[in-house]
Image: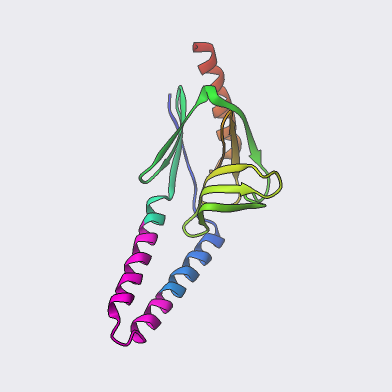
Amino acid sequence: MNVKFKYGGFDGRVWWISAVCVLLTGGALAALWMTAGGAYYLAAWVSMACAVIVALCLLSVPRRIIVGNHELELRCLVETTYIPLSSIADVEVLEGDGLRRKVPLVGIYGFWGYYGRYIDLKTGRLHRVYATRRTKCVAIHTSKRRYVVSCNAPEMLRSMILSAKARDSKEA
């Protein structure tokens, strides 16, 4: 039995950060192109680097969470993270701003979502974040890692993970 959860829409902060990043990058590229003074290869190189970064951001956007019989799947466009239900130690719903005091080490902060490896400034622990919004977050603790995901129904996701974990442990 597979239960699918959507990450939900982006919050307003994501749209504003994305729009500002696109406008600033476009303005910087236009200024570089106009003032290149014969060094158009530099402007073309920077344009290509920006296009690659934007493409990587778009390919890493989280799509859905699937609670299966034996594992939890966190699906992005090109990457799927599998978490065995037997390794999940705890699942908690984060109240309010689920990404409070978390800073990205490697990843994206607000440019079409929040994903990557984040460090919690309060505890110093490393988290893998797959979120499209800062609210409605669920923390999944395993024996090795901590994950933070966002979805439209965090309480229902928590209960489905715990019930699937109970079924999986009975079968084993």
Q: Nearer the viewer, residue 169 or 105?
A: 105
Q: In the image, residue 155 lies at what x, y percent?
A: 61, 36
Instruction: Answer with the quarter of the image where residue 79 lies.
Output: top left
145 shown above or below 165: below
Whether residue 1 is visible: yes
Whether 172 is among the magenta residues is no
Count of numbered circles in the view:
0
Extreme residue toward the right, this view: 122
Q: In the image, residue 16 lies at what x, y percent?
A: 52, 66
15 shown above or below 73: below
Q: In the image, residue 143 lies at what x, y percent?
A: 58, 28
- Residue at position x 29%, y 80% from top? 40
Q: Main secondary structure of the magenta part?
A: helix
The residue range painted magenta reads 26-55
160 shown above or below 108: above
Instruction: Answer with the quarter of the image where residue 145 lies.
Output: top right
- Residue at position x 42%, y 79% from top? 27
Side of 26 relative to 116 (left or right): left
Q: Nearer the viewer, residue 126 or 23?
A: 126
- Residue at position x 55%, y 28% from top? 161
In the rendered image, the quadrant that contains the N terminus is top left
